[in-house]
Structure formats: structure tokens, C-alpha cells
Image (spheres, rainbow, N blue to C red):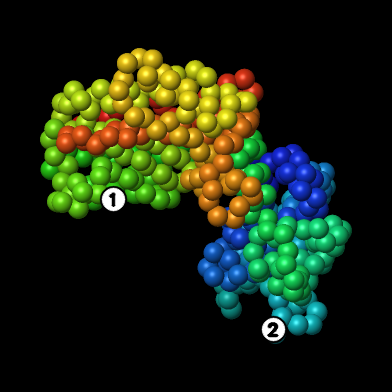
């Protein structure tokens, strides 16, 4: 795969934007820029809002446009995309005062008496190649205005930064509900990243758990998960463990106790999500039966999970299996989309704030089947959660399901 290319599913984007009468997405949020272009906008992440933008036309035949500064493009060795490809780049030089014509490009030269860095030629050549196709703009706002000019004014914007750069004083359509809908169906590049993220996340969680023993603390486990995630090139978010009461009482992992874990980390922005029960010593029979009920629900869902089901169907399948097999146990059997966020799905009615919707499952989605048991016994609690890629006619587990619980 090329170093720099859109991650976003352009065919789904075209379908969603056309359905809403939107000609282009105008993006300035760091995660949205990354999703659209494959480029992490470092300066925006450092707090320099409006230093980078992305424009995603509704038409999948038109390239996504990345707007960034000439010096950042050069310094971070961003490549020169092929003409006519899925990504184009517009650079700006931001002269003093952000007014006037574009400034000459800035490159790093050797100090007096120094020696040229031969590898610098790669970065310099890439930047000069971009500038040869499209001369630099004086600032980001002027580049953005040029990028959106072919698409009328029916844009959807993700932040006020984009609106300000375009000089919009009135209201504009928010892009976030559309982006959430688009992100639910992954492109092949995104699916590859999700596979890696899921694998890394599970390996880090297992390594952390098996480094524990009775007498270790829940804080030891959290630090171990963070360390193991980092070793694998990921970024840890959290590992939920046991109940708050157990963690706050003395925070010690005790023999005979069982506890749930919910481990979440991301790799290159894409998230893994993994839940299991951990037995410390011999399993308690009551808690083991709760684990069996969760496995019963999880296995039944795995056999039926495919395009066309609603989220509510997943819950129904799990609950019916638990009841049919004689378990008097409450298992949640919830579903959520996972991707650039732990919960990466459209909200009911296009809301900007979380409002869970009953989505219809489609091929290309990555969903969590989340089966915590809604009971807390004196000896512990139970969780079981896996990630699934929805295929054209079924599903594929993105993590190893051979161990429904772990024992230390």
C-alpha cells in the first residue's frame, strides 16, 4: 500500500453524500483528516487549529485534497502522490502576517562546513514535485477556497475552523453525522488496519494478564497492558477491570477471585476491543456457569451474524440461546461498530450527541459483540467480547476466540 492514500471508503462516501445533497466534505478535525487522506496532521494535533484541511468530493472519481504547509510536507517526508490518483496535495507557505503572495519554499541546508544529507533529496524532490503541479498558496485558507471552488457551496463541514477559513458567517451543515455513517463500512485499507489493531490488542491484554498473580494489583495490570501495547506499536486507551468497589477497597488481585477485563487500544488510529473473564486460581462454579451462559450467547450469535440483521436481532439471538439452554442468567448481547473510535457509528436521526440506533448490519462493517453478564457474585464478574468483520455472506472473527476465559 502507498504511504499516503485515503483510508475512507469512497464508494460509501459517494452514496451517503449524494443521498444528503452534499457536494463535498470540508474537514479540519485531525482524525477526520487522517481518515480522508492517511496523513496525521501533526501541527493540528499540537494545537495549531486550521493548519491542515482535507476536502472529500462526493464523486469517488475526484481525488481527495490534502492541504498542509510546504515545510511540514518536506520535513515529515510526505510523498508526492501520482497525478490522477486518489489523493492530491495543495501546499501553502504562510508568509509573515499571513498576507500577500506565497513565500519561497523553505528547505534545510547544511551548516557552514557541514556535509549534505543525501537522504534529504527524497523529501525535497517530493515537495518540489507537488509544487510543480500546483504552485504554493500564501496560506491555508486560500488553498482551501481553491480546493472547494469546483463543488459549489453544498458542503458539509466538521468544525468551525473550516467555516472560518471559508469566510462563512451563517450556519453550515455539520459533517459529523455523515462521517459516522461512512466510517461504519470500512475500506480494504481500514480492514487491514483493524485486523492488526485487534491482534495487537488481544496479545497485549493476554501478555499483561499472564504476567499477574495473586497479590498483584489492578494498577499493576493496567500498567502492564499499557507497556505491552506500546511494545507492539499501539496506543493504550484503557483496561477496565473488576468492579469499582474491588479496585478501591485495596486494589489487590486475590486468589479465588474472578474479574472481567475490557481492553481497548488502537494501532494507527484503529481500535481493538477485547473482553474476557480472568479466574485467579480455580474457577468458582457459580461464576463459571455465568461464563458458560456468555459463551452460549456468543456462539449462537457467531453462527447467525451476517448482513441484513439489525443490532436488535443480535441481542434477540443471544437471549434466545441463553433461555433455550436453561441458563437463568442475564447476558447483555450488545453490538457496536468499532473503527477510528471505540464506538464508531451513526447516532439515531443524525444526532450530534450519542443516541443509540438500531443499525442494519452491512458487509464491510467491523462490530463488537459485547456479552457481559449482568450479575455480580461475591467471587467475581464476567465479560466476553470479540470483534467481527462482516463479510458478504457471514462474519469473520478478528481475534482468537479459543479461550472464552483466562486463568492465572
Residue 359, image x and y in percent?
59, 36
Lower sequence index among marks 2 and 1:
2
Q: Which residue lies furthest to the bottom in this view?
A: 97
Q: Is residue 65 at all visible to an observer of this figure? A: no
The residue nearer to you, when weighing 118 against 381, is 381
Residue 6, image x and y in percent?
68, 47
Quadrant showing the N terminus: top right
Q: Residue furthest top?
A: 325
Q: Which residue is drawn at 84% across and 57% down?
A: 151
The residue nearer to you, when weighing 56 against 301, is 301
Q: Residue 305 carries which label?
A: none
Q: Mark 1 points at which residue?
A: 223
Kind of element beneath mark 2: helix
As drawn, 33 above or below 274: below
Kind of element beneath mark 1: helix
Q: Which residue is drawn at 15% across and 46% down?
A: 252
As drawn, 106 above or below 134: below
Number of marks: 2
Q: Mark 2 points at which residue?
A: 96
Quadrant showing the C terminus: top left
Amino acid at each position: 500500500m502507498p504511504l499516503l492514500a485515503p483510508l475512507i471508503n469512497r464508494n460509501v462516501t459517494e452514496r451517503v453524500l449524494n443521498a444528503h445533497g452534499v457536494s463535498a466534505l470540508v474537514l479540519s478535525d485531525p482524525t477526520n483528516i487522517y481518515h480522508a487522506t492517511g496523513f496525521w496532521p501533526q501541527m493540528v494535533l499540537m494545537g495549531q487549529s486550521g493548519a491542515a484541511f482535507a476536502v472529500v468530493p462526493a464523486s469517488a472519481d475526484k481525488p481527495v485534497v490534502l492541504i498542509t504547509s510546504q515545510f511540514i510536507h518536506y520535513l515529515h517526508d510526505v510523498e508526492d502522490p501520482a497525478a490522477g490518483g486518489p489523493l492530491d496535495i495543495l501546499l501553502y507557505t504562510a508568509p509573515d502576517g499571513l498576507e500577500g503572495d506565497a513565500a519561497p519554499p523553505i528547505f534545510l541546508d547544511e551548516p557552514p562546513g557541514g556535509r549534505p544529507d543525501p537522504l534529504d533529496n527524497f523529501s525535497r524532490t517530493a515537495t518540489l514535485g507537488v509544487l510543480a503541479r500546483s504552485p504554493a498558496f500564501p496560506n491555508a485558507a486560500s488553498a482551501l477556497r481553491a480546493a472547494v471552488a469546483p463543488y459549489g457551496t453544498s458542503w458539509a463541514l466538521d468544525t468551525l475552523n473550516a467555516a472560518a477559513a471559508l469566510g462563512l458567517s451563517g450556519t453550515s451543515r455539520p459533517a459529523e453525522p455523515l462521517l459516522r455513517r461512512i466510517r461504519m463500512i470500512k475500506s480494504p485499507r481500514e480492514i487491514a488496519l483493524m485486523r492488526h489493531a485487534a491482534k495487537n490488542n488481544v496479545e497485549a491484554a493476554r501478555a499483561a494478564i499472564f504476567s499477574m498473580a495473586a497479590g498483584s494489583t489492578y494498577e499493576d495490570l493496567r500498567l502492564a497492558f499499557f507497556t505491552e501495547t506500546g511494545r507492539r506499536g499501539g496506543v493504550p486507551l484503557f483496561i477496565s477491570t473488576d468492579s469499582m468497589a474491588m479496585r478501591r477497597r485495596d486494589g489487590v488481585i486475590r486468589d479465588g477471585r474472578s474479574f472481567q477485563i475490557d481492553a481497548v487500544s488502537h494501532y494507527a488510529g484503529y481500535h481493538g476491543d477485547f473482553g474476557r473473564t480472568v479466574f485467579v486460581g480455580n474457577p468458582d462454579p457459580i461464576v463459571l456457569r455465568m461464563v458458560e451462559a456468555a459463551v452460549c450467547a456468543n456462539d449462537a450469535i457467531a453462527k447467525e451474524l451476517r448482513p441484513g440483521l439489525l443490532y436488535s436481532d443480535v441481542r434477540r439471538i443471544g437471549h434466545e440461546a441463553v433461555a433455550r439452554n436453561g441458563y437463568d442468567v442475564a447476558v447483555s448481547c450488545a453490538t457496536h461498530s468499532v473503527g477510528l473510535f471505540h464506538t464508531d457509528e451513526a447516532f439515531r436521526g443524525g444526532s450530534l450527541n450519542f443516541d443509540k440506533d438500531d443499525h442494519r448490519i452491512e458487509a464491510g462493517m467491523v462490530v463488537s459483540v459485547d456479552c457481559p453478564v449482568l450479575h455480580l457474585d461475591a467471587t467475581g464478574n464476567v465479560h466476553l467480547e470479540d470483534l467481527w468483520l462482516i463479510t458478504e455472506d457471514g462474519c469473520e472473527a478478528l481475534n482468537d476466540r479459543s479461550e472464552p476465559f483466562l486463568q492465572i
